[in-house]
């Protein structure tokens, strides 16, 4: 993610032709609505400039697309799995061990593509290396890169310790003996801070830009992404255990309880993100097909449907069905991916909307607006 990315300046339009170079180097043509002033009933340039920018985007839209969507999704998955595994290891007793073991491997598997996705998005590997030369506390990108590195060290070490204790390394290896000689629980506990940071910082990163949809939800996106990280990672661990014949169903019941709590919290935050921006800024979430994606795919299939599948076992305190767990987990994972897709591409559409930028500016200058 290039640091100069989203919303840091005015559109580079070419004067009277109503064209603007977008982030891909292509040229888009925008409607110059003030030009209809010569027609009867048309608006003058002055009329149009009061609350718009002649129909031209005021800020550059972010160039982030699918690489960043996948990075956000996998970053949440790896951090959430680490959190769930560590909590199960510390407080789960004997029944928590299968959860901790599966969580360690899911966390590491989801972590591996993250640096690759970041480097591909930056375009040149040296840009990623340059970000490691300095640490800027006021830069969300710099803090994020160092947070990812810190978390990666804990995740890798915890997974290697788990593999050594599981007998996946020859026990006579010096490195294996070294890993087994150190307290894995303390190492995992020490990484809780960096895992929590990674789970929520992607949402904070969006809120730190000038993109109207993200900036208006700046206080909500961090908690929303962290909550979604917990729900998707819990679902991923449950999916792995449900597909493992010898995994105890008691572990699935514990995961379903945690997943239900995370989904309820996520539901509240998802609704708040839709309501807080208001009609103009929230248009990328409500206009046309976007409304159905938000209501049906994120809320309906990604949150309410898994809760409905989990409800019978939760209500009667029964052991869950493996097939039902597999289906519910798949829906939660798909919903978490759609949430990040909608927020990233919704932000791009929001940046292209001059009315949204003006509405955001007005809300900041006049709190009552």
Image: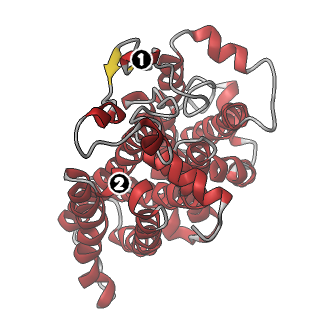
Q: Residue at x 63, y 25 (%)?
A: 3
Residue placed most toward the observer, 285 or 78: 285
Q: How many marks?
A: 2
Spatial distance from mark 2 to mark 1, Cα to Cα?
28 Å
Q: Residue at x 30, y 65 (%)?
A: 299
| Residue 81 visible in the snapshot | no
Q: Which residue is mark 1?
A: 16
Residue 234 place in picture, x, y as percent? 43, 59
x%, y% of residue 167? 52, 39
C-beta proximity under 8 Å, tags 2 and 1: no
SS for callout 2: helix
Above or below residue 104? Residue 55 is above
In the displayed structure image, the side of residue 64 where residue 345 appears, left or right: left
Q: Where does residue 246 sit, x and y in percent of width and height?
A: 31, 58
Q: Could you tell which of marks 2 and 1 lies nearer the N-terminus? A: 1
* Placement of 333 over or under 181, stated as above or below: below
Q: Quadrant of the N terminus?
A: top right
User: Observer-nearest residue: 302 or 273?
Assistant: 273
Q: Where residue 340 sits in the image (x, y, percent)?
A: 40, 46
> Which residue lies at the image location 47% right of the left edge and 35% below the top edge?
71
Residue 283: mark = 2
Q: Is residue 50 visible?
A: yes
Q: Determine the secondary structure under disc 1.
A: helix
**Foreground label between 2 and 1:** 1
Q: Quadrant of residue 148?
A: top right
Q: Does residue 46 sit above or below 204 in this rendering? A: above
């Amino acid at each position: 993610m290039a640091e100069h990315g989203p919303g840091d300046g005015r559109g580079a339009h070419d004067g009277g032709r109503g064209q603007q170079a977008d982030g891909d180097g292509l040229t888009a043509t925008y409607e110059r609505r003030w030009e209809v002033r010569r027609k009867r009933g048309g608006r003058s340039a002055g009329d149009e400039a009061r609350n718009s920018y002649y129909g031209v985007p005021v800020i550059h839209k972010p160039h982030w697309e699918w690489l960043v969507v996948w990075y956000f999704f996998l970053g949440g998955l790896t951090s959430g799995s680490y959190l769930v595994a560590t909590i199960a290891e510390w407080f789960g007793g004997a029944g928590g061990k299968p959860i901790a073991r599966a969580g360690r491997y899911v966390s590491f598997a989801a972590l591996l593509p993250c640096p690759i996705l970041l480097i591909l998005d930056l375009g040149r590997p040296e840009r990623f290396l340059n970000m490691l030369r300095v640490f800027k506390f006021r830069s969300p990108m710099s803090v994020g890169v160092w947070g990812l590195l810190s978390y990666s060290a804990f995740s890798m070490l915890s997974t290697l310790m788990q593999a050594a204790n599981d007998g996946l390394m020859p026990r006579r290896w010096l490195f294996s003996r070294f890993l087994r000689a150190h307290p894995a629980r303390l190492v995992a506990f020490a990484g809780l801070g960096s895992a929590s940071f990674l789970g929520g910082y992607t949402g904070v990163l969006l809120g730190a830009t000038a993109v109207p949809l993200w900036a208006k939800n700046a206080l909500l996106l961090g908690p929303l992404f962290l909550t979604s990280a917990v729900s998707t990672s819990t679902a991923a661990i449950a999916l792995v255990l449900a597909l493992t014949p010898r995994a105890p169903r008691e572990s699935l019941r514990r995961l379903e309880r945690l997943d239900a709590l995370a989904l309820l919290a996520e539901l509240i935050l998802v609704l708040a993100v839709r309501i807080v921006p208001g009609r103009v800024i929230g248009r990328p979430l409500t206009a046309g097909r976007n409304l159905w994606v938000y209501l049906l795919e994120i809320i309906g299939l990604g949150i309410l449907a898994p809760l409905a599948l989990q409800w019978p076992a939760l209500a009667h305190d029964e052991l869950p069905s493996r097939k039902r767990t597999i289906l519910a987990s798949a829906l939660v994972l798909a919903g978490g991916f759609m949430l990040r897709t909608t927020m990233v591409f919704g932000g791009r559409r929001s940046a292209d909307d001059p009315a949204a930028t003006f509405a955001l500016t007005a809300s900041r200058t006049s709190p009552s607006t």
